[in-house]
Amino acid sequence: MIGSIGLVLMRHDRMWGVALAFAAIAGSFLVSYARARAESLGYAPGKGMAAVGLAPREVRVVILGIGLIGAGVTGGVAPGATGQTILGGALLVIAVLATITVIQRILFTVKQAASEVDRP
């Protein structure tokens, strides 16, 4: 979905939107990767890792939905429409929160690993 938004913004010569879409996709992939990697190492299996971080998948989907609805209500992504700004803002929020979530998950896993090393 985010890739499609990037393509639509690219069609309207909004390269900043393409960059934000790329950052949001990369951040979202890294959130999933951090969880999968931690679980493969035996840390926080199941729903334990899903609860770590500001923006798990559900939060990112809600933010994207709000951005899409806001863009639709304010004129879409046509040149000069406010919808471009709203959608770009949603992509920016997703990219930033996904990055913070990745960092939180990495720190959570490191903390778990350190606590295992400290145990006799």
Image (cartoon, rainbow, N blue to C red):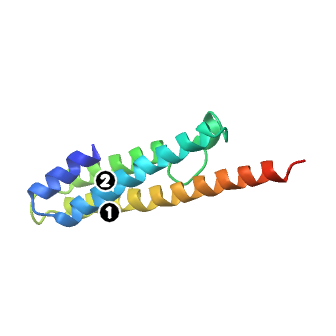
N-term mark: 1 or 2: 2
Q: Position of residue 45 (x, y in %)?
A: 64, 35
Q: Which residue is situated farthest in the right direction here?
A: 120
Mark number, residue 89: 1
Q: Is residue 89 above or below residue 109?
A: below
Residue type (three-letter) at the residue carrying disc 2: Gly
On the rendered structure, is 28 left or right of 10?
right
Mark number, residue 67: 2
Q: Is residue 20 above or below residue 38?
A: below
Residue sitting at x 52%, y 55%: 102
Q: Position of residue 15 (x, y in %)?
A: 17, 64
Residue sitting at x 67%, y 38%: 42
Residue sitting at x 59%, y 57%: 104
Residue type (three-letter) at the residue carrying disc 1: Gly
Q: CA distance from mark 1 to mark 2?
A: 8 Å
On the rendered structure, is 45 left or right of 3?
right
Q: Is residue 76 visible?
A: no
Mark number, residue 113: none
